[in-house]
Image (cartoon, rainbow, N blue to C red):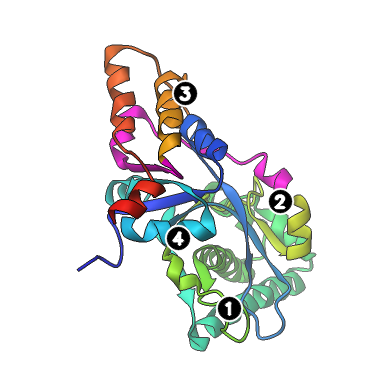
Amino acid sequence: MNPINSSSLFHFTDQIEYLKGILENGFRYSYSFELYPSRKKRTKGCAIPMICFCDIPLTRTLEHSSNYGKYCIGLEKKPLVSELKEHINPVVYLSSTHLQNNIIELRATDKWLSSDLCSRIGISKRKLNSICEDIYDYDKIYSAIDTIEAHCSEDYWRFLENQKTLYYLLGYCKTTYSGSKHDNFDYYDEREWRIISLFSPKTKNWILDITKTKFDKIKTTLNDNTPYLKIYPSRFSFINFIIVENDTELDIITEFILTSNKLFGVNIGFSKAEMKKRYSLITKLTSFERIEKDY
């Protein structure tokens, strides 16, 4: 029986030049717009830098490529998850109205806590947000709490923890279907995993409370400044598959791997040991043309 999921996580792209870019520079974080769950018509969401993968068997990659591109790289799931355990998680697909309502209530709590604190302390919401630049820098948080009246400090902690919980839920959640009538694309078929950059108010790497229209206007600029996930030669064993569209492109990628001065974002030379690493990648090469014939 074919497995439902795979030992590999597959990242797809739609052009051979993009595949070369990954092979040379590593996996680039790309901003994704995620709508907030809402009881009303949803207009706002957040833009989150992430790298997306699909947890599907090799036999399903051909079908999946029709939507996401004829080029992909498969990474070994277990060591990747072990290496990036703070950043990587399968998507939680939202179908239950109960679960969606809980997230909606968490957002409402966030707004209520901030408004109540501002009212009791006598400052603006902007000032509250600037009191502590980074909610993960606990030295700054302790210092910030000293500036707040004692009877409000506990609520301030609740506000910070509520924010952190909310943002990560949004980062790893996705509705099961597109369209309000559940008659469009079934996202669950993607079996998506995400590697997400840790949220940092200091660097403002997540764009909160943004409309899809505004996001579309600034997406290219945002993506021009995102970092890469590098894979060092000692971790090339993580790579299970490098898949191109057809057999004629296998030679192109083979030559690229053998001659590039960088692979997956790391400088690599041409010593005997380094050439062995290059050849290990070439053994991972195949094509969707070949997969279609063989499977």
What segment is highlighted magenta in the picture? 219-246
* Residue pictured at 46% horizontal, 21% vertical: 260
Q: Which residue is mark 2?
A: 219
Kindly identify the residue that appears in the image at 52 percent across and 56 percent down. Answer: 68
Q: Position of residue 74 (x, y in %)?
A: 37, 47
Q: Earlier in the sequence, mark 1 or mark 4?
A: 4
Question: Which SS class for mark 4?
Answer: helix
> Residue 228 lies in magenta, yes or no?
yes
Q: In the drawing, what numbered circle is on residue 262?
A: 3
Q: Which mark is residue 184?
A: 1
Q: Residue furthest top?
A: 271
Q: Which mark is residue 64?
A: 4
Kind of residue at badge 1 = Asn
Mark 2 or mark 1: which comes first in sequence?
1
**Above or below — where is 33 with respect to 40?**
above
Which three-letter amino acid code belongs to the residue tagged 4? His
Q: CA distance from mark 4 to mark 3?
A: 29 Å
Position of 113 relative to 244 (above/below): below
Question: Please, what secondary structure does the residue beneath circle 3 have?
Answer: strand
> On the picture, is 87 further left or further right than 216?
left
- Provide residue 202's location: percent of width, then percent of height: 65, 47
Amino acid carrying mark 2 in the image: Lys
Query: Mark 1 and 3 residues: CB-CB less than 8 Å, in contact?
Result: no
Closer to us: 141 or 243: 243
Q: Which mark is residue 45?
A: none
Residue 282 visible in the snapshot: yes
121 to the left or right of 194: right
Q: Secondary structure at mark 2?
A: helix
